[in-house]
Image: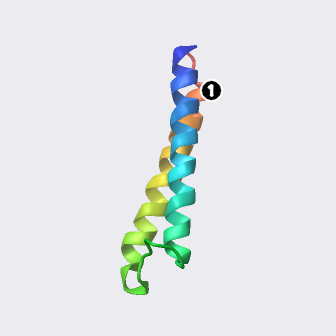
Amino acid sequence: MPLVVISATVCVLFMLFLAVDIQKILGGRKYEISPEDYVYAALMLFVDIYEIFIHMLDFYRDD
C-alpha cells in the first residue's frame, strides 16, 4: 500500500514537471527554451514521460 501512495505522488509530481516543461517549450513566459536547445527540450520531455510511465507500472506490481 505505501508503494502505491508513493508512486501516485511521484506521478503527480512528474505530471507537474511535464506541464512546466511544455510551458517552457511553448515560451511566452519568464522562462523559455530557445529553438536552438531542441535536444535539451526533447530530453526533458522524454525523462518526464519515462518517469511517469515507470511509476505507473508500480501500481500493478505484485508485492
Q: Residue at x 54, y 56 (%)?
A: 18
| Left or right, 1 with reference to 44 | right
Percent position (x, y) of residue 59? 61, 27
Q: Quadrant of residue 35?
A: bottom left
* Residue highlighted by disc 1: 60
Q: Could you tell me which secondary element the residue under label 1 belongs to?
A: helix
Give the camera-side residue of 29 and 62. Answer: 29
Counting from the top left corner in percent of width and height, residue 51 is at 48, 45
Q: Is residue 14 above or below residue 61?
A: below
The residue under label 1 is which amino acid type? Tyr
- In the rendered view, would you say 39 is above or below 61? below
Task: Determine the residue positioned at 52% across, 42% down.
Answer: 13
The quarter in which the N terminus is drawn is: top right
The foreground one among 62 and 2 is 2
Residue 23 locus on image (x, y percent): 55, 68
The residue at the far right in this view is 60
Q: Residue furthest bottom?
A: 36
